[in-house]
Image (spheres, grey):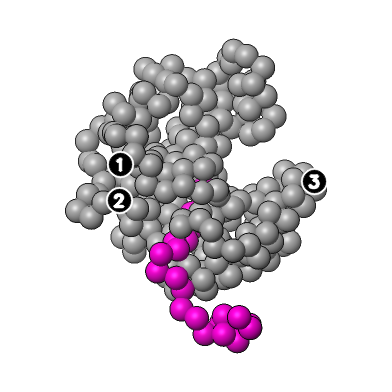
Amino acid sequence: MNAMAMALRPPSADRRLIVSIHDVSPAFAEPVERLAEMIGGILGGPRFAMLVVPDHWGAAPLDRTPAFARRLRQWADAGVEMFLHGWFHRDTSAHRGAAATMKARYMTAGEGEFLGLSADEAEYRMRAGREMVEQAIGGPVAGFIAPAWLYGPGAISALKACDFALAEDHFRVWRPATDAIVARGPVVTWASRSPARTASSLAVAATARAMPDWFPTLRVAVHPGDVTKESLMRSINRTIRSLAGRRTVSRYADLMPEGEGRHEDC
């Protein structure tokens, strides 16, 4: 199929694209605004999700920043899906075992908050964070997504206790109440922490643009730090445009069985 034919071909109805902005916090108000404007322009409106951190690193409480809380409500009212994204987004747990320590300290820059929490502590943070975010947006959150997509046994137990409609990790989206997997496939994301990580993420994004559409659902996630490197912003722009031209831009709610939505009780 030549380039002209591909350009004229409508997006595939059975191939979805879901886009999200992570680490949404008053601490990153300007980069989040920039990302939302760019993505909304590409997708034709607020057809993406935001992952909201209630008190990023204990220094940016959402309930003490009314201007940002109002902005969140505007986005939510416009149709942006809002997920709870941890509480502090900082891992302060003492981990047992080399594998958990490696994940916590080196793979995630110490931000895998829910990897080492007990069930009680995880549930407490989920409940408190959910209340704060829902007060800001004026409605229920769409689900919970752990910082760095890392869940320990305590977090998995707390997800069920809180009855979140959806959760996700690097490779799947699932319903915590039943463990039913509603989407499988990787997340395309970018890294700004080091030149090596940046180069690797740019290569992965280029592969995602070129590879066949094997996965029914493909997720794209961006972070505030991405705006610090123009190479990343160019790649994000190209990647979302490319995938949106071949896939149906969707919401997480579209993964749920018809008639089911978000839960309001925790």
Question: What element does badge 3 sit on?
Answer: helix
Q: Are marks 2 and 1 in contact (CB under 8 Å)?
A: yes
Residue at 42% over, 48% down = 183
From the image, tell me which residue sits under label 2: 256
Q: Which mark is residue 165?
A: 1
Q: Quadrant of residue 206?
A: bottom right
- Distance CA(mark 2)–CA(mark 1): 9 Å
User: Secondary structure under badge 2?
Assistant: loop
Q: Amino acid at mark 2?
A: Met
Point out residue 158 in the picture as x, y percentages from the top left corner: 35, 25
Answer with left or right where residue 260 lies relative to residue 174: left
Up-down relation of residue 70 to residue 133 (above or below): below
Question: Magenta residues?
Answer: 1-22
Quadrant holding the C terminus: top left
Can you name the residue that lies furthest to the front here? 1
Residue at x 74%, y 49% (from the top left corner): 200
Q: Residue at x 46, y 47 (%)?
A: 184
Q: Mark yes or no: residue 251 visible.
A: yes
The residue to which callout 3 is attached is 196
Look at the image and say whether residue 45 sits in the magenta stretch. Answer: no
Q: Residues within 10 Å of mark 1 (few under 14, many from 20)?
A: many
